[in-house]
Amino acid sequence: MKYNVEQKKAISHHQGPLLVVAGAGTGKTSLLIGRLLNLIEKKRAKADEILLITFTEKASYEIEERVDKAREYGNFDSQIYTFHGLAEKILKENGLEIGLPLDYRLINSTEQWIL
């Protein structure tokens, strides 16, 4: 992937938080993948220390697939979720602590509308 100057700066950024604001089709997904791979390659973080959150399942799957192809042995450790997927993971792992029954389930779109 070819990156422009600003994308290269974002990919190699390592001092404090980073906010990327860009419109649709500007390469944000590619930038996130480049940043994730850079962090691992430069040993600034281990793959299992990286959490990447997206808004859509489509983006999540695309990122997982592209990271898997880019890494020599695939992507087994990086945590790539949608916001809702991460919330569900947290509930599954910690639900008992807040009194959530083991057999809880998320409601679907129709049930959301009815509610």
Image (tube, grey):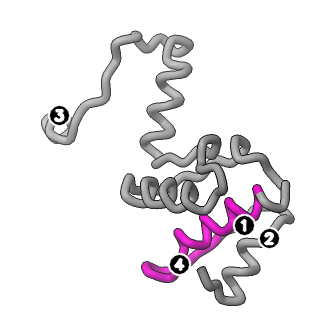
**Circle 1 residue:** 18
Query: Which quadrant of the figure has residue 1?
Result: bottom right
> Label 4's element?
loop
Q: Which numbered tag is attached to residue 13?
A: 2
Residue closest to the eye, 87 or 42: 42
Q: Position of residue 44 (x, y in %)?
A: 84, 55
Q: CA distance from mark 1 to mark 2?
A: 8 Å
Q: Residues within 10 Å of mark 1 (few under 14, many from 20)?
A: few
Mark 3 or mark 4: whose residue is earlier in sequence:
4
Q: CA distance from mark 3 to mark 1?
A: 38 Å
Mark 3 or mark 1: whose residue is earlier in sequence:
1
Q: CA distance from mark 2 to mark 4?
A: 17 Å
Q: Is residue 82 rendered to the left or right of residue 111?
A: right
**In the rendered image, which quarter contains the C terminus?**
top left
- Tell me the amino acid under the disc marked 2: His
Q: Is residue 83 rendered to the left or right of residue 79?
A: left
Query: Which quadrant of the figure has residue 84?
Result: top left
Q: Position of residue 72 (x, y in %)?
A: 66, 56
**Circle 4 residue:** 27
Query: Which quadrant of the figure has residue 108?
Result: top left
Q: Position of residue 2 (x, y in %)?
A: 62, 85
**Circle 3 residue:** 111
Which range is magenta? 20-40
